[in-house]
Amino acid sequence: MDSEVFAELLSDEGQALLREVRGVGPAQELAVATRLRQRHEPALVSAAMAQSRLRSRAEAKFGPADAHALYFTADGLEQATRTSVAAHRARRMRELGVRTAADLCCGIGADALALAREGIRVLAVDRSPLTCAVARANAGALGLADLVEVRCADVTEVSFDGYDALFADPARRTGRGRVFDPEAYSPPLSWAVAAARAAPLAALKVAPGIPHEAVPPEAEAEWVSYGGDVKEAVLWFGARQPGGVRATLLPAGDTLTGRGLPDPEVGPVGRYLYEPDGAVIRAHLVAELAERVAGRLIDATIAYVTTDAMHSTPYAAGYEITDVLPFNVKKLRALLRERGVGVVTVKKRGSAVEPEELRRKLKLEKSAAGSCTVFLTRVAGAPSMLLGHPLR
């Protein structure tokens, strides 16, 4: 789809087409498209069908209401921030006093829309004419056009003087896939950091796997997860905790901040095991979690925390452990059969064994009603198996 076809999609004819193709499934697409091409330009029909497919895919990120009001490109949807994650960042900006912001590399506008919904006036910049047209249409679709100005330009040539804050989400994908070198981002991370340092307040979205040593000393690094999956890392400049780290867990919004604690002690596996949220692990805050639950590590290199008493924490999933055994597939198979276990959830940390491979070797009785969680890990350096059940 090019800019001209997208403009037609916004016309009365295009809007009627979008309404007509909503809900058309893959099995019906060919017949529906063939029929519609008798009355409409083929390029417009193809654009409407593609938009319908993208909107269905977008429901997971944006929710049904927004997904079917907004417009997408395939790359734009792939790279767009989930609504709840963008909303969290926008709320924090508002709480830090931001009233105007420049959104550099805005894409289809997901972050600009979240900022505008917090009442922040946004300059959204991207160099792709089609992407800018989509972002502009999205602001209009949500009734936010008065708060979002979309400008098609190279972000490195745009002045953001006079704005309270800068947000930048450099492109981390090329036609060949993901980019892992921060200097291969577009624009490079070094440029984004320099721009952030020049702004009163700034937030740079980076890959969750960014090494801690790559975080500038004056930035606060925040790792954000949604439903247990780590979604992004954000480098905050000019925020309240320079040099700090935090882990934020959505949708609840619980935040764990770093206090520079030493590594927890290592000890025997207790009755309970806690698996830290991925954001807690990425932020190197396992020690802070261990302190909260009065726990210890099962191995100096493994991010599992164990305790003798049960604790409630939003920062980890808890399990009651029934068995701690040396790794041995035959013994595990015999034990599970003896206990009538037919469903096994396999988790691993510090083990070379793949969960699917282990499930095949266990040859569980499908008719068995019992269930169990098996942890493949190391305990004090030794390959081990921990059996247990999730805490309710």
Image: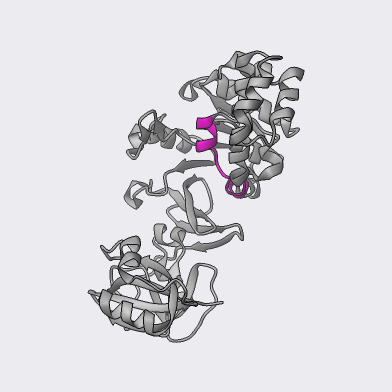
Image location of residue 101, percent across then percent down? 61, 35
Which quadrant does the C terminus fall into? bottom right
Q: Quadrant of residue 117?
A: top right
> What secondary structure do most residues of the magenta stretch adopt?
helix
Q: Is residue 87 magenta?
A: yes
Q: Is residue 91 magenta?
A: no
In the rendered structure, the answer to whether residue 167 lies left or right of residue 116 reads: left
Residue under the point 61% across and 61% down: 252
Between 351 and 99, the one nearer to me in the picture: 351
Image location of residue 127, percent across then percent down? 51, 21
Between 71 and 120, the one nearer to me in the picture: 71
Q: Quadrant of residue 141?
A: top right
Between 243 and 230, the one nearer to me in the picture: 230
Residue under the point 63% across and 23% down: 33
Image location of residue 328, percent across then percent down? 25, 76
User: Measured along the vertical axis of the image, is residue 96 above or below residue 71?
Assistant: below
In the rendered structure, the answer to whether residue 142 lies left or right of residue 264 reads: right
User: Measured along the vertical axis of the image, is residue 123 above or below residue 207?
Assistant: above
Residue under the point 60% across and 57% down: 251
Image location of residue 51, percent across then percent down? 62, 29
Labels in figure, total: 0
User: Measured along the vertical axis of the image, is residue 352 above or below residue 313?
Assistant: above
Residue under the point 40% across and 70% down: 287
Q: Is residue 11 visible?
A: no
Which quadrant does the N terminus fall into? top right
Which coloring applies here?
A: one colour
Q: Quadrant of residue 35?
A: top right
**Residues shaded magenta:** 74-89
In the rendered structure, the answer to whether residue 387 lies left or right of residue 25 reads: left
Q: Is residue 381 visible?
A: yes
